[in-house]
Image (cartoon, helix red, strand yellow):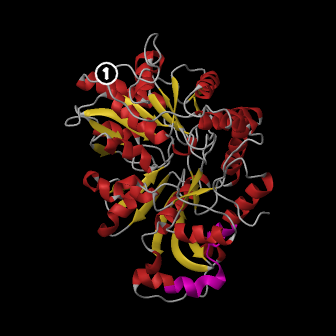
């Protein structure tokens, strides 16, 4: 086992002789190697409208410039949970931002929230495919149709595919669905050209326009017209930028693309991600995101949710184990330059307290990924959910006094009584408990949840909600109850509603789905 397992690592081909040849050729700016790289990318993606650039940030900035939006009336709906480049490109085009919330099941943009925020001024939807997990592009297409039908204006879509080289949605590669898409070829991405980016255009018109604008707006094919000075550019009708890729970066990218395909590098990411899906499932205190089996996900990062406000503790624990983990991207809406756009995002507020990414890339071998899983399980084992034991009665009573302000120990509790009391222990200390009483009926029993209490030091971390949901699950699945009933004080109505229970008269209840 290595002393330190990195979260990221540069994927560079073994043989870089072609790069040396380019460096010594005397032709190192945009030239034949750029064209060759673009042609092989077009073949890999089976898509014709691909251009190389000097960075993904340039690609995103260019994308908005191409659309010729009205800076006073046109708005962009975007996600704040992404690399800052996703949104700095909006700022550099002087366009206003409307934030959309985060999908709690995928860490991608919440498309339902997007729909609620589309109005007559919405012209662009921007999002990142988090970790390479594709956003539902069928729903995106529905949103485009919704905006067109309701407001009579086209909703443009800009996909930030920085995490998603080789990702597929419904067996088709991202970048090829008819939106403007930008990929990153920065150092630690699936495919690197040292630094660089790709922009995918939806049609030939935008492709030709972007090809001009990536180099000042100069038509390079007209630069050496017969009878003219080969160094002087022709007329520039629309000015552009110096966003082009050079032959050095193109040769690095070309060499790495061939290396990536030949050695099935993406499959290593996929295998490690699938291993985590299978081996980190059902670990108490750890929650996984959803991945659609119809999609191909080369997990650029593998993000998990660490529950109960234990994220910092988890990061420190993994550091002690020699494993580098991180949230990877800070939410953009809290940066000073974006404060004027800040709005309430309930899902993101909760998710950001939980998300941590673990190493998943090509460099993680079978032993290392098993070690990572074992360490996460070891961290989780500090936290356990179980039934009360006879040795825990006094400690349980000390917890219960926070609920009733008095207690007396019943030293004659039966085994069945002990088994009806469920507790959460952290480092063998009871921090939360609840009682489940099964009432037998003529047909199917009813489950009663009673005496729910969380230690005052641990309230607000989600322990109580988790324990209640656990009791609901075992009532339905283990005891075949048809209904759950819970009585509570009025000041706790909101809490129990958030647990999935419904207010009915003087109590809360939940019925088993038929």
Q: Is residue 347 left or right of residue 287?
A: left
Which is more toward the observer, 315 or 245?
Answer: 245
Name the foreground residue: 468 vs 224. 224
Percent x, y for residue 130?
52, 45
Q: Is residue 231 magenta?
A: no
**Image: 474 above or below 127:** below
Label 1: element kind: loop
Decide whether residue 380 is among the magenta residues.
yes
Q: Residues within 10 Å of mark 1 (few under 14, many from 20)?
A: few
Instruction: Name the one closer to the observer, 362 or 211.
Output: 211
Q: Is residue 15 left or right of residue 104?
A: right
Q: Residue at x 59, y 84 (%)?
A: 393
In what quadrant of the picture does the N terminus appear? Answer: bottom right
Would you place residue 422 above or below residue 350 in this image? below
Q: Quadrant of residue 493?
A: bottom left
Q: Nearer the viewer, residue 47 or 470?
A: 47
**Span highlighted in magenta in the image:** 378-398
Q: Position of residue 441 (x, y in %)?
A: 52, 56
Q: Is residue 363 visible?
A: yes
Q: Which residue is mark 1?
A: 237
- Quadrant in the picture for residue 320: bottom right
């Amino acid at each position: 086992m290595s002393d330190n397992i990195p979260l990221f690592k540069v994927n560079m081909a073994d043989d870089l002789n072609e790069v040396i040849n380019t460096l010594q050729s005397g032709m190192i700016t945009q030239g034949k190697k750029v064209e060759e790289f673009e042609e092989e990318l077009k073949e890999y993606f089976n898509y014709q409208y691909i251009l190389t650039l000097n960075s993904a940030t340039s690609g995103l900035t260019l994308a908005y410039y191409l659309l010729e939006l009205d800076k006073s009336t046109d708005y962009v709906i975007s996600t704040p949970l992404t690399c800052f480049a996703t949104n700095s490109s909006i700022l550099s085009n002087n366009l206003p931002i409307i934030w959309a919330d985060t999908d709690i099941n995928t860490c991608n943009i919440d498309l339902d929230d997007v729909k609620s925020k589309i109005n007559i001024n919405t012209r662009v939807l921007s999002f990142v495919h988090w970790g390479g997990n594709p956003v539902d592009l069928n729903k995106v297409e529905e949103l485009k149709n919704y905006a067109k039908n309701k407001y009579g204006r086209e909703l443009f879509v800009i996909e930030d595919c920085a995490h998603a080289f080789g990702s597929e949605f419904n067996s088709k590669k991202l970048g090829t669905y008819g939106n403007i898409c930008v990929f990153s070829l920065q150092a630690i991405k699936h495919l690197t050209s040292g630094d660089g980016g790709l922009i995918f255009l939806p049609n030939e018109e935008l492709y030709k326009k972007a090809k001009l604008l990536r180099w000042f707006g100069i038509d390079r094919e007209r630069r050496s017209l017969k009878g003219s000075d080969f160094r002087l550019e022709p007329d520039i009708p629309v000015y552009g930028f110096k966003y082009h890729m050079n032959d050095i970066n193109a040769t690095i990218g070309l060499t790495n693309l061939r290396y990536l395909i030949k050695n099935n590098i993406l499959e290593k990411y996929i295998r490690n991600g699938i291993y985590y899906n299978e081996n980190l499932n059902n670990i108490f205190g750890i929650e996984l995101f959803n991945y659609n089996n119809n999609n191909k996900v080369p997990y650029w990062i593998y993000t998990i949710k660490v529950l109960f406000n234990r994220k910092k503790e988890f990061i420190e624990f993994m550091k002690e184990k020699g494993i580098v983990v991180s949230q990877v991207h800070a939410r953009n809406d809290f940066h000073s330059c974006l404060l004027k756009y800040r709005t309430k995002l309930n899902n993101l507020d909760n998710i950001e307290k939980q998300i941590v990414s673990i190493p998943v890339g090509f460099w993680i071998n079978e032993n290392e990924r098993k070690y990572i899983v074992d360490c996460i399980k070891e961290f989780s084992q500090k936290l356990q959910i179980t039934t009360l034991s006879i040795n825990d009665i006094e400690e349980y009573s000390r917890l219960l006094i926070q609920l009733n302000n008095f207690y007396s120990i019943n030293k004659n509790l039966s085994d069945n009584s002990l088994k009806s009391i469920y507790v959460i222990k952290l480092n063998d200390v009871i921090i939360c408990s609840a009682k489940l009483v099964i009432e037998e009926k003529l047909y199917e029993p009813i489950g009663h949840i009673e005496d729910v209490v969380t230690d005052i030091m641990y309230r607000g971390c989600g322990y109580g909600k988790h324990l209640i949901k656990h009791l609901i699950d075992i009532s339905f699945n283990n005891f075949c109850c048809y209904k759950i009933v819970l009585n509570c004080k009025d000041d706790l109505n909101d809490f129990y509603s958030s647990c999935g229970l419904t207010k009915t008269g003087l109590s809360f209840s939940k019925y088993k789905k038929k």
